[in-house]
Amino acid sequence: MDEIENSTKGYVYILEVKDIDLPVCKIGMTSRDPNDRCAEINKSSTGDFIWEVAHKVLVDDCKRLESLVHEKLGPLKQKRREFFNINGDDAYRALRSILASQSNVKEITVEDMGASQTTIPRTGGYRPARKSSFRIIDSTYAELLQSFTTIIGIKGRPFGQLNKPVFGMSDGNEGVQWNIAVSTDTQEVRVGVNLEGLVYSGWPIATFILSELASPSINELKISLERPELIVVRFTRDAWQFHSRPKIVEQYLGGREIPMSEMDSEIWDLTLKEAICCLNEKKRYRGRNQQTVTLANQPKKGERRRTMWVCPHLNIWTPIDMNIDLTGSLETGIARLKPVHEWLSRVSQ
């Protein structure tokens, strides 16, 4: 946060990484020329990025406006860093929306700065707008993530990127997690309960699968649910390539996503048996297994059919309607999934 001298008049600026199209920006304030402030940041920074000014807005209370923007975009803030997972153009649209929706901060001109303005801002050359990596990233999207963290009562951990197929946030729990995910192609929003095939404490997904194979309890869960037709079981096979998970043809365990209303003992048993094969039997299923899978996209080098490390990944989700009351829709979805969260937590322990 920049220092404001004797006045709150000044700029709220948005910096983007120079010459690289990344969905990351830096948002700050200054009473001086934002270009000079950016040069100071680049000179003092020990990081890999060289920043440039993407947008700037001159207001009568830059400290308050910066605080409003940081609060609204808080769910997109990177952990322990002053960066936001949003590109500069989308952040600017959010800033404009925030500025228009309140009455305490007013946009002003350079002449309004008065004699204390000792530096005349450079106008700079034409800067073409970058392509938005997510078509509806604005204050509404930030409000969605902020509402999620408030309802769950967590700080939240972002996952994915705005230029990837899915972006969202989880509670960061090492085991059964709450999460919310947004499809950047369709803008579909899902809130879900998630259990990945990761080590955590004793491979809880292995405990869950073995328990359900021995004594299935999903039918009891199904009976307890309200609107089971709106709750979907997504059991997938993650294929690992170093730390990334490329999309594979054999992604779905059981062949597809299955609404809870269609789930029965036979489907569940077949899905579980396919899931346990994604874990290493020699390690008592506490580890990944190797399987031959088909990459969904043709790689530049090598064959599409490859032997890779795999593990199961369970996500049980329900849709969120963005066209009605946002907070109310989220609260309804989370309440609908609470029995699922309790069940999955209990069986996986």
Image (cartoon, rainbow, N blue to C red):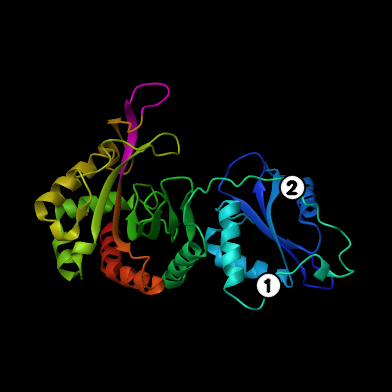
Q: Secondary structure at mark 2?
A: loop
Query: Of residues 75 and 218, which is closer to you in this image?
Result: 75
Residue under label 2 = 45
Q: Residues within 10 Å of mark 2 (few under 14, many from 20)?
A: few
Residue under label 1 = 64
> Where does the image place residue 29, in percent across and percent down from the top left?
72, 62
Residue for point 28% across, 45% down: 236
- Above or below residue 305? Residue 50 is below
Residue for point 60% across, 47% down: 129
**Quarter assignment of residue 106:** bottom right
Query: Of residues 180 and 285, which is closer to you in this image?
Result: 180
**CA–CA distance between discs 2 and 1?**
25 Å
Q: Residues within 10 Å of mark 1 (few under 14, many from 20)?
A: some
Residue for point 42% across, 69% down: 152
Q: Residue furthest bottom?
A: 104
Q: Is residue 208 left or right of residue 331?
A: left
Residue 1 visible in the picture? no
Mark 1: which amino acid? Arg
Q: Residue furthest left?
A: 266
- Above or below residue 32? Residue 105 is below
Q: Is residue 332 left or right of residue 262?
A: right
Q: Secondary structure at mark 1?
A: helix
> Where does the image place residue 317, in percent across and percent down from the top left?
29, 59
Lower position in the chain sequence, tag 2 or tag 1: 2
> Where does the image place residue 251, in percent across and percent down from the top left?
28, 40
Quadrant of image for the C terminus: bottom left
User: Range of the magenta residues?
Assistant: 298-312
Q: Is residue 66 left or right of residue 194?
A: right
- Asked if disc 2 and disc 1 are in contact, CB closer than 8 Å, the reply is no
Mark 2: which amino acid? Ser
